[in-house]
Structure formats: structure tokens, C-alpha cells
Amino acid sequence: MKTIGKITVVLLMLAVSATSAQESVELFSVPLSDPGSKGKLELHQIRGSITVTAYDGQEVVVKASMDARKSKNGKTANGMTRIGNSSLAISAEEHENTVQIINEQHNRKTDMEIKVPANFDLQLRTINDGDIFVEGVNGEMEISNTNGKITLENVSGSASADTTNGDVKVDFNSVTAGTSMAFSSFNGDIDIRFPSSLKADIKLRSDMGEIFTDFEMAMDSGRTVVKKSQPGGTNRIELEQWVKGKINGGGPEILFKTWNGDILIRSN
């Protein structure tokens, strides 16, 4: 472990057997500069799932599971034998309670399992071969996936969650008052559960699906006529496809959007 000012850098190079079906290892724990205060976790990766769970500790604990590389042993033209290479390089940097995890395994599926203190902000992103799952965290969450689902269970605070191919499901224990949120998918359902005391302006759109809620929602009447300027000074007139309403008198805007899926807004 190397410390540079307030930045802690943890680097692991792990040699593992190329013949094992799966490799799993607890990599490291990252101490925080100010234990007990709010922190933030940042993790962007190319392939694999991300699981973040809250626990009672004051460090960020990182574990990884990887698909074993298939050995490509064989003789090359110069007579040398090629053997499998399955080293792992993952690092983490901590600065003023912000922990950034860097996964350099860009061409290899790596499932990350991370424990954080409950009072933590999250910025998580994955692209292929994995889902994102968060449980028990209280904070501001920015969650992005491309080919996988997003699930947030027993969370508090606020969230922005988007994926292209997958469902988005969130279960809030409480929400931060006065904070806007957004939930979107292209191919997938949006299923969000809020406290019954939620106050929000709701904006919804599902091109190929249905919209359901058990909240008493005051709906805006009619579709708004929208004028868009076109080249040459002409205007194009459209009907807005968004559905709008208010819950408990209204509040900050919460956006829900999917193209091929249903939208479900549930009350605790």
C-alpha cells in the first residue's frame, strides 16, 4: 500500500491458475480519510456485474470474481510454447472519503462485490455481461448499465438509474426531499416503490408499454402542443407524448421513461 498525501493507492497483481473454472478473491479494504462521515464510491467498468451492500464497518471492502481464462497453449512458429496468462490488476484510490476503483481487466468479465458504510454516495457503471445490485445504502446514487438490469433494494436518498437492455427496479425506504430523480430503460420495465408521503411532479413516457400506479395522482389534462422551429422560419407542430401528474400536491420532478416496457409506480 502506498500513501501519497491523502490519496491511498492499492494495487493488486494476482497470478492464478488458468485451468480453474472461476477465480474469486477478496482484494483489499480501503480505509477512509474521515471514518464515520459520508463517503462516495466510484466504479466504472466494461464487463461484469457490480454488487454494493451496506454494512456496519468504516472501510470499503472489495472482492472480485472472474471467469477463468481458457488456456491457449500451443507451439508458435519459433518452437516456443504459449501458456495462459491470468494475472489480475485492480487498483483503488481514496481521497477525502471518495473511493475510486479502477478495473483494468477491460477484455475480461469481472464481477465486483463491494461493502460500504451505509451513508455513502454511489456512481456505478457497467456495459456488458452484468447487472448492478445495491442494497441498504443511504445516499445520492448515479447508476448506469447498458446490457443488464439495475436493482436497488432498501435504499434511501435519491437515485438516477438508466439502462438500455434491462429492467430498472428500485425500493426506497425514504427519499431526500426536494431532489429530482430519473429512471429510464429502452427495453425493460421501470418498477419503482416510494414512501406514501412522496411529494413530486411526475413525468412519464412508455411508447410500447403500459403505466400503472397505486398513488392518488392528479393528472394534467390533455397533451401539450409543442412548436419546433424548422429551417426557413417554418414551425412543426407536434403533440407531446409525455404523461404528467402530481403526487401529494407536487414537488421536484421525477422522470420515468421506457420504450419497450411498462412503468409501475408503487406506494409503500
Image (cartoon, grey):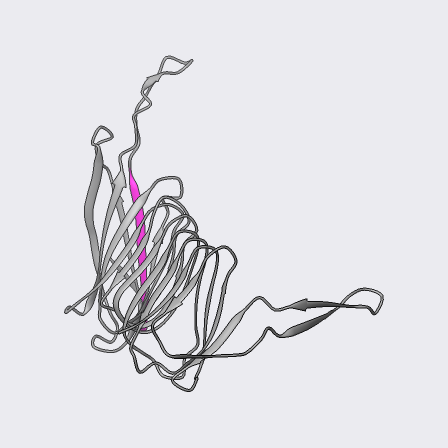
- Region rendered in magenta: 87-96
Q: In which quarter of the view is residue 47 placed? A: top left
Tell which of 161 and 81 is nearer to you: 161
Q: In the displayed orientation, state which residue is furthest to the left.
A: 56
**Is 265 situated left or right of 58 in this image?**
right
Q: In the displayed orientation, state which residue is furthest to the bottom.
A: 249
Q: How many marks?
A: 0
**Is 146 situated left or right of 150 in this image?**
right
Tell which of 20 and 184 is nearer to you: 184
**Is 244 situated left or right of 168 in this image?**
right
Could you say where residue 117 lies in the image, as x and y percent from the top left?
21, 69
Tell which of 110 and 202 is nearer to you: 202
Rendered view: 102 above or below 37: above
Rendered view: 33 above or below 206: below
Could you say where residue 235 lies in the image, as x and y percent from the top left?
78, 69
Query: Can residue 194 be seen at all in this image of the molecule?
Result: yes
- Residue at 43% x, 51% y is 146
Could you say where residue 21 lies in the image, as x and y percent from the top left?
22, 32
- Residue at 43% x, 55% y is 261
Could you say where residue 54 lies in the image, as x and y percent from the top left?
21, 66
Q: Quadrant of the N terminus?
A: bottom left
